[in-house]
Image: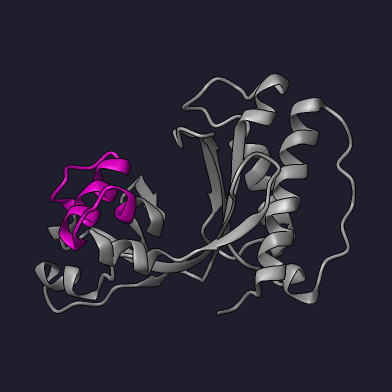
Amino acid sequence: MLYSDAEGDLAVRIAREAVEAFVDKRPMRSFVVPPAFEEKAGAFVTLNVHPAGDLRGCIGYPEPFFPLLKSVVKGAEGAAEDPRFPPLPPEELSQITVEVSLLTPPVPIEARKPKEIPKQVRVGEDGLIVANGPFRGLLLPQVAVEWSWDAAEFLSETCVKAGLLPDAWLDESTRVKKFQAEIFAEAEPRGAVTRRILGAAHARH
């Protein structure tokens, strides 16, 4: 594991503050961060409606372009105005939970034939990025677990997310990458932060 529980807790608290400051249109309070937050890393921030768990926004940066702190803050601000949903209003801040996924750099999946790609996808551990021409889609590791997909279904759904046909991953011109994530989430709005262990959840399906 790259990040400690304390660092995961801090990432979620920073994301929560970034969301609330953005929605309330006020300056964000500053945090003292460890050196790991100053290193470039990808991150996604997910907002869920509590207690139903419905998605309310999810935005992030898969590539390590920014220092982790900036990736988390920008992802949080983006999630508050995810274009798939109405902008988050102040009255909803106490009704959502914040989840942060801290990512490893994406790496290409190399296979002799496209049909062998599923063998290299570990459901419950890997997230996927699919790209073909201008089309690009990403799904975090927790999505495959939440929907009980196998590796081939996960690949197909990532293609659909990209705006491609479900079997586009079988096209040799399609590029497939995978990454891993350490996931930390509030148990309730503004509540305690815990590390999500996906492997155990996948094993139960």
The answer to which quarter of the image holds residue 35 is: bottom right
Residue depicted at 63% across the width and 32% down the height: 80
User: Which residue is at 71% across, 42% downward?
Assistant: 190
Quadrant the N terminus occupies: bottom right
Task: Report the front residue among 112 and 53.
Answer: 53
Quarter of the view holding residue 117: bottom left
Q: Quadrant of the C terminus?
A: bottom left
Q: Position of residue 111 (x, y in %)?
A: 19, 77
Residue 132 in picture, x, y percent from top left: 28, 52
Residue at position x 68%, y 39% from top?
A: 77
Is 3 contained in the magenta span? no
Report if residue 14 is visible in the image.
yes
Percent x, y for residue 133?
31, 49
The magenta segment: 144-168
Q: Can see residue 126? A: no
Q: Is residue 159 magenta?
A: yes
Number of callouts in the render?
A: 0
The scheme the figure's colours follow is: one colour
Vertical placement of 56 versus 72: above or below? above
In the image, residue 91 above or below residue 22: above
What secondary structure characterizes most of the magenta part? helix
